[in-house]
Image: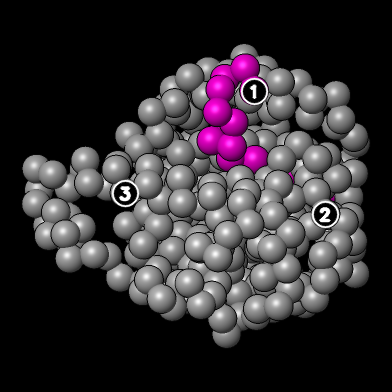
Amino acid sequence: MATKLTQLLNIKYPIIQAPMFLVSNVAMVTEAMKGGIAGCIPALNYRTLDELRAAIKELHHNKVEGGSFGFNLIVNKSNLKYKEQLRVLCEEGCDFIITSLGSPEETINQAHKVGIKVFCDVVDLKFAKKVEVLGADAVIAVNNEAGGHRGNVTPENLIKELVANCDIPIISAGGVGCKADIDKMLSYGAEGVSVGSPFIASIEASVTDEYKQACVEYGAQDIIMTERISGTPCTVINTPYVQKIGTKQTWLESVLNKNKKLKKWVKMIRFSIGMNATKNAATKATYKTVWVAGPSIEHTTEILPTKDIINRLIN
């Protein structure tokens, strides 16, 4: 399964274990590397810079040949820790950084100075061309089957459009739960895939058993969009609680979001509240649960070790 992605990261299989807020951790990524793929953790999973630094050091210690590790950075103003997190990543070193929700220009410039590759989340050709000009090493093409904040274009259409118009590798994100899905994405021209939701129900994931079991019991038809987490549409499991609270913004949020002067601050507050709610849902057993996931949980039939999930993806 040699592709440009396997060459870029010196991995055995063209798969990135996608960064997931509060789900991804050192144990998961260590098992990912042992399985011959790349693993990625959101920098925001660590409350302090010392915790982030310690995680990087541990991953360096655990690294094996054929695997690699990286971190995801939110690069817009909602992440007040962004610049310090970037500094720590550059000081300690990692194989790659995935940027989301903002301009990756500073990240690309700083990371490339120390030999770190940068992949950028994009949802369309316009942004793909922008990050290519800035020097991105690859793009993560987030399609309409991704979990969390997804795109609006089908995997086939998005991959083919980006491949036809970009000179850097295209990594597809969304809609992958088994090897047949990977083969399909590669047939469209992708050089690899980013896979998240299937790893929620892993033994190593840092979430409650209730969250993991939900990914087993629910399927693709149970994934819906909600605006109640971050203010931006996000995919979640359609639990009874989600049905109860609804999926649309409150009337007050809707009014405030239309005010040009207040819109930025409303988004930052909504993002903070949403992160808190997601943390509670992921780490506490409560009926008030809003579990983020994508339709690829369709292939999740039991809670398994990360290594077994990787085997399902490559065999």
Q: Secondary structure at mark 2?
A: loop
**Left or right: where does residue 252 sit relative to residue 6?**
left
Q: Which residue is mark 2?
A: 203
For label 1, count other residues whose C-alpha is less than 10 Å away and answer few (under 14), some (14-19) or many (20+): few
User: Depth check: 76 or 249 in front?
Assistant: 249
- Measured as percent of width and height from the top left, residue 173 is found at 59, 61
Disc nearer the start of the sequence (2/1): 1
Residue 270 - label: 3
For label 3, count other residues whose C-alpha is less than 10 Å away and answer few (under 14), some (14-19) or many (20+): many
Picture layout, residue 277 above or below residue 90 = below
Q: Residue at x 63, y 67 (%)?
A: 189
What amino acid is at disc 3? Answer: Arg
> Which residues, given as a range, are shown in magenta?
36-51
Image quarter of the C terminus: bottom right
Q: CA distance from mark 2 to mark 1?
A: 22 Å
Q: Residue at x 85, y 32 (%)?
A: 63
